[in-house]
Image (spheres, rainbow, N blue to C red):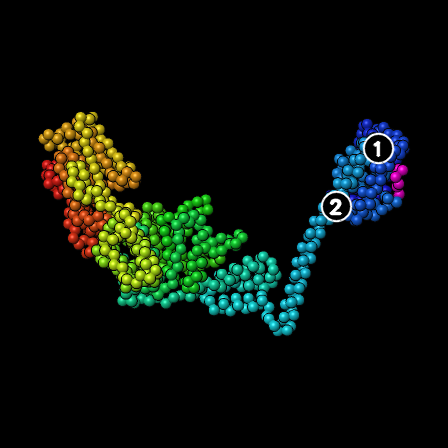
Amino acid sequence: LHWVELPDESCQFMLSTLKRFKVRRFYPDDQHYSAEVDYIEEAAPEMTEQLRASAAAIVSTLKELIPHNPTFSQEMHHLLSQVNLDEPIKLTDLAASMTNAKSKALQRILETHDIQERMEQTLLLLREEYDLSLLKEKISQKIDERLSKHQREFFLREQLREIKHELGLEQDRKQMELDRFRKRFSELTLTKEAKERVIQELGRYEFMDDSSPESQIVHQYLDWIAALPWGIYSKDKLGIAQAERVLNRDHYGLEDLKKRILEFIAVSKLRGGMRGGILCLVGPPGVGKTSLGKSIASALGREFYRFSVGGMSDENELKGHRRTYIGAMPGRLIQALRTTKTANPVIMLDELDKAGRSFRGDPYSVLLEVLDPEQNKDFLDHYLDLRFDLSNVLFVATANSLDTIPPVLIDRMEILRLSGYVIEEKLKIAQRHLLPKILTDHGLTEDNLGLPRETLKQLTVKYAREVGVRNLEKKLRSITRRVAMRVAKGDKQKVVIQREQLHDFLGQPEYPEDAYKRLESPGVVRGLAWTPTGGSTLPIESIMLNGSSGEFKLTGQIGDVMKESSSIAHSYVQSLLREVPGKMQFFKKNTVHLHVPEGATPKDGPSAGIAMATSLLSLAIQQSVSPTIAMTGELTLSGQVLPIGGVREKVVGAKLAGINTLIFPEANRSQFEELPAHLRKNLIIHFVKHFREVALLTLDYELSC
């Protein structure tokens, strides 16, 4: 009847067939196909009720399809006008051809001889076609509804905008935003790169539909650029006297640290201005690292911003997320500049030693760039994708320990150590800073609560002996709350708490009397140790088991380095006793057990060498060491005493424990002499080079070697 060429160079044609046939064999050649076929004689079937019902169902389904399938509506009308229910074969074949069924399904109908079965297959195809048409119509209707709603809102919004504009009631919101942005950008000292980006983004935003998501993203981006302090700096206060007053007002003690900060300000004053710097305050918890950062900002007249790096394991928290991400924002550093509204604030990176690493990146790698004065002038945030100068920012980091911080990062910072406070300093801090602030916070005055010096000292020794003052503040607040309750009930009488009454307010002491404070026994020695939480004493005990096999036991959850120190001490003392009459076989005839108490606490380091050797020698010669003596130093197999670390921390720990006689390596003399006078006060210090000096000082025992 007709044929149509298709774009893929194939063709589609319609035929008018005469008879049904079955192909037996094909005969292809270059010109055309021919085939040997068997004709299938198909007599008109007898019209049964079942055939008539099937034909009626086909006609009914075709009528239902007409409104939902406009493509074939004309053909269907023609079909319905040409056939009737008494011609089931013709009706079935034409109805099947009206569907969009796959060729395999249509071929299956052609190959079916039984007219009833053929009509059922055709009816199934028609029902599938009808269901598919309904689904398409439903989907199209939903899309049309959404489009029409969006278009309606758009046209109404445009009409409302034009009406308000004509009446002069309101300016165009987008135009107002554009004017605001242009005014703000004209006031800022943008870099060339930032100016070009702003012009580009303003052009995009101007021609965007307000309701589009991209418009909101561009608006937020421009808002961030406009909110940053391009070329805006706080004026530095470089007065030495004023800075000293601020530091002394906010903190007691820390003289070395204050001196270093004042030197930093003095250099900046002579240079005519202050560039950025990187300070790292290292010390145990509660010694005032964070508050010192605030005081530095106050002394310089700069804005202060603090955020914690502890637990941060995603570098994007520092450098931001790219704008392609949903909900993207700049990193914490750019957020700090927006909050402080100045390009030279003091930014504190708190808990620097507790940052983590993960598959999202390493924050320390970002900080290598941020804390490098040669690189941070071109800091590139992922969200802004613009370079911002951080070289004028003063970075102050805090950490409890440097062990977990990469050495290359430590190299970029100036390390300032805060070793903690001795009892006298803690008493001053409590009287001058903590107690007045706590009374004010609780609505009380000095007329309501009195804490004599002896009470504060007892509180510090028995309830808050740590090197910081955080726990001391907690205990003072606990006492103040009890007093506040009395006052709230109407008791206006001043409460003066004596040292004997602390038990009534705070319960049992958290730090009972040191069991080793008065213990004098052969083999018992007090060493000195320090950790990120501060310095402390390290008791060491040793005993002998008579008649044993000469074994050397070691307990106390100590690390590999400390185990090596104990082996060195054991071998060295054993070599000494070979020259002592009656003691030559001491270690061969007896099992010696050396223990470092507080077995639940891990311990490690080389500085307990001379203390372990003294304990073993004391046990061997059965002489006691005074409990008022504590020592620290690394021991070699030749008896040399090598230097150790943490001098200040160990001195503070010894003073907190009430020990006044200390033995240090000679190589640490200069570090001790640099300590403040109040730390060296009332201490008897012996500096030694060889273990023979230790034996003479502690046991009054003179060695020949």
Residue 110 seen by the camera: no
Tell me which corner region of the image, top left, top right, bottom left or bottom right, holds residue 447: bottom left
Residue type at tag 1: Ile
SS state under label 1:
helix
Give the residues drawn in magenta, as a range.
82-89
Q: Is residue 114 visible?
A: yes
Task: Report the magenta stretch's main SS.
Answer: loop
Frontmost residue, 126 versus 484 = 484
Q: Residue at the location (19% across, 49% down)?
A: 658
In this rendered view, identify the residue nearer to me: 528 or 11. Answer: 528
The image shows residue 356 at horizontal and vertical percentages of 40, 46
**Which residue is denoted by mark 1 in the rendering?**
115
| Residue 199 left/right relative to 130 | left
Residue 56 position, x and y percent, is: 85, 40
Which residue carries the number 2 mark?
133
Spot occupied by residue 344 in the image (x, y as percentages of width and height): 39, 62
Answer above or below: position of 457 versus 554.
below
Which residue of the protein is positioned furthest toward the front in this rendering? 490
